[in-house]
Structures are given as structure tokens and as C-alpha cells.
Image (spheres, rainbow, N blue to C red):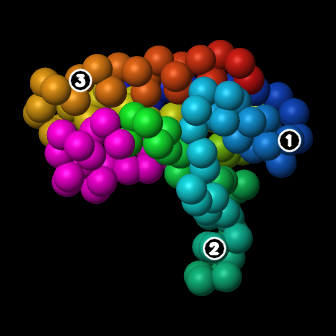
Amino acid sequence: MSYTHQTRVHGEFDDVVSTTIDALEDEGFGVLCDIDVQETLQQKLDADFRQYRILGACNPGLAHQGLEDDLDLGTLLPCNVVVYDDDDGIVVSAVDAQRLIGVADDDALDPIGEDASERFERVLESL
């Protein structure tokens, strides 16, 4: 069973990252952090790695709702979206927020996870 939603796109890597960020913003998410894994591994380990970015996405309204119910939910935030080079193009993969929030085992959080997952699916469909 998958824990992500993903799509494969073609284009320039940096353009796909920018388009992904714009699509996230259109769905109410801000990108709180942008980790360049390729650069980090090169600097810290002198290791070569494919282009790979981790975008920490957060929808403030959904996060607020969840934190009002469960303060420890912050350990699951932000939701990550990754963009990476693959042999057949560029993959954009978003965490399945519904499954992620499911680990809290709190039925009150289910609608938040469903909403976030639907938003991520629309982001991926728009790319």
C-alpha cells in the first residue's frame, strides 16, 4: 500500500519545482522549507546524488484545525512533497496526508487528512 501520491512530468527540473510550488500555493499550502538534498549530500558527504528537493508544505487552516485537536500533531507537520530526477522524467510525490494523520488514531482528524490528501491530488493533477 502506497504512502504517497505521485505523478511523472517532463521539463526542466527547476521549472517543475517552481510549478509545483505555485500549484501548492493555489491549493492553500505554503512551502515552509525547501531542502536541496543533492546539494546537502554533496556538501556534507562529498556524495553525488540526483536532483532531489524536499518541499515542506503546510496549509495553515488545516494545520490550525489539527493542532486545536491534538498538539502533538505538529510532529507530522509540515507535509512533504518531493521532486526528483528519474530515468523517465521528473517525479513529483506528495505524502498521503490521510495515511499520515491516520497514525494519530483520532477520528476527529480524519476530515483534515482527507482534505489535505484531496488538495495534494489536485496539485499533482495540475502539473
Are the residues tagged 1 and 3 within 8 Å (C-beta)?
Answer: no
Which image quadrant is residue 79 in? top left
What percent of the width, then of the height, locates residue 26? 68, 28
* Disc 3 target residue: 110
The range drawn in magenta is 64-81
Is 77 located above or below residue 15 in the figure? below
Return the residue at label 2: 40
Query: Disc 1 and disc 3: Cα gap in Å?
Result: 34 Å
Question: How packed is label 3: few (under 14 Cα within 10 Å), some, or many (20 or more)?
Answer: some
* Whether residue 78 is situated above or below residue 11 in the rendered picture: below
Gap in Å between the C-alphas at discs 2 and 3? Answer: 35 Å
Q: Amino acid at mark 3?
A: Asp
Label 1 vs 2, first from the N-terminus = 1
Q: Is residue 120 magenta?
A: no
**Secondary structure under the numbered disc 1 in the rendered image:** helix
Which is the main secondary structure of the residues drawn in magenta?
Answer: helix
Give the amino acid at mark 2.
Answer: Thr
Q: How packed is label 1: few (under 14 Cα within 10 Å), some, or many (20 or more)?
A: few
Residue designated by label 1:
15
Q: Earlier in the sequence, mark 1 or mark 3?
A: 1
Quarter of the view holding residue 125? top right
User: Viewed as shown, does residue 98 lie left or right of 10?
Assistant: left
- 82 to the left or right of 22: left
